[in-house]
Image (cartoon, helix red, strand yellow):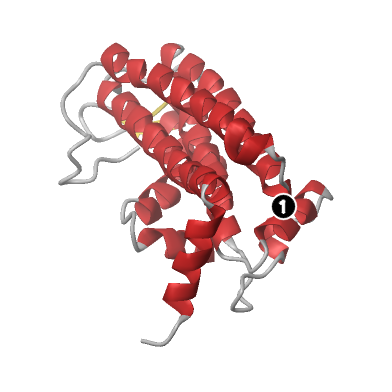
């Protein structure tokens, strides 16, 4: 991963200390799932199915991500950051459509989200989801771009195998599954951005729980927003 200057979360911390936050996030996700299940008399909506699927995926990714950091495998850890962000971005798609429950049912039937359209007729492509979220979360575009490099074969993977020797005159070749030394800061950054993706997901999950618990309030808010200025 790469540092973003000015990000207050990217402080000098150890890997183990930063990893501790993953457990806090796990508990937060489970607590949100419980609140969602009990909301509005434990009524089950189609979007609940979609939201719980996002939570389950997030928890599974976090479990694997932690293991990859412990094993010092940045190639896999970086890819998992991208997948966690993918979960959060697709959760936000439910706020872009006219009927989130119909949207959720379409996903349940196997329809691809990037082939669906928002309420303005725009396809729900990653680019559009990133653009929408970036208005309130400006870190998303950069992390999306950097983490995507770990998904696709890129210069990051080539750099692991080829490099200059200390004298700068010859190439060295090292083909190994092990990370090179000196990547502690990169591991910490990966953890921070994985957690930021999780918090983005939690933000929208909490929004759905609030909507479910307060349908009258949300309906009135929507009418006020759509009313005359």
Q: How many labels does the image show?
A: 1
- Residue at the image point whose x is 67% and y is 70% from the top: 117
Which part of the image, by quadrant, shows the C terminus? bottom left
Looking at this rendering, what residue extends furthest in the right direction?
109
Give whichever of 32, 4 is nearer the camera.
32
Q: Residue 140 appears at what percent x and percent y?
A: 38, 52
Q: Residue 151 appears at what percent x and percent y?
A: 55, 41
On the picture, is 7 further left or further right than 121?
A: left
Looking at this rendering, what residue extends furthest in the bottom direction?
228
- Residue at the image point whose x is 54% and y is 31% from the top: 35
Whether residue 174 is visible here, answered yes or no, is no
Give whichever of 153, 199 is nearer the camera.
199
Which part of the image, by quadrant, shows the N terminus? top left
Q: Residue 54 appears at what percent x and percent y?
A: 61, 38
Report which residue position mark 1 lands on: 104
- Residue at the image point whose x is 37% and y is 60% from the top: 134
Vertical order, 165 against 115 (above or below): above
SS at circle 1: helix
Whether residue 51 is visible here, answered yes or no, is yes
């Amino acid at each position: 991963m790469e540092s973003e200057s000015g990000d207050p979360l990217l402080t000098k911390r150890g890997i183990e200390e930063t990893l501790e936050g993953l457990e806090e996030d796990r508990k937060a996700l489970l607590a949100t799932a419980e609140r969602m299940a009990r909301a509005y008399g434990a009524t089950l909506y189609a979007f609940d199915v979609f939201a719980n699927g996002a939570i389950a995926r997030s928890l599974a990714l976090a479990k694997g991500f932690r293991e990859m950091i412990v094993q010092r495998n940045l190639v896999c850890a970086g890819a998992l950051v991208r997948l966690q962000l993918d979960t959060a971005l697709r959760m936000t798609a439910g706020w872009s459509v006219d009927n989130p429950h119909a949207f959720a049912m379409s996903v349940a039937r196997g329809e691809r989200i990037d082939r669906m359209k928002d309420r303005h007729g725009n396809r729900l492509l990653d680019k559009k989801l990133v653009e929408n979220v970036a208005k309130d979360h400006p870190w998303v575009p950069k992390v999306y771009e950097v983490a995507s490099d770990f998904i696709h074969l890129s210069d990051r993977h080539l750099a692991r195998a080829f490099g200059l020797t200390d004298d700068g005159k010859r190439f060295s070749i090292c083909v190994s599954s092990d990370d090179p030394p000196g990547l502690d800061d990169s591991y910490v950054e990966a953890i921070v951005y994985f957690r930021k993706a999780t918090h983005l997901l939690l933000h929208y999950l909490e929004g759905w729980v609030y909507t479910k618990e307060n349908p009258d309030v949300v309906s009135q808010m929507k009418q006020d927003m759509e009313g005359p200025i």
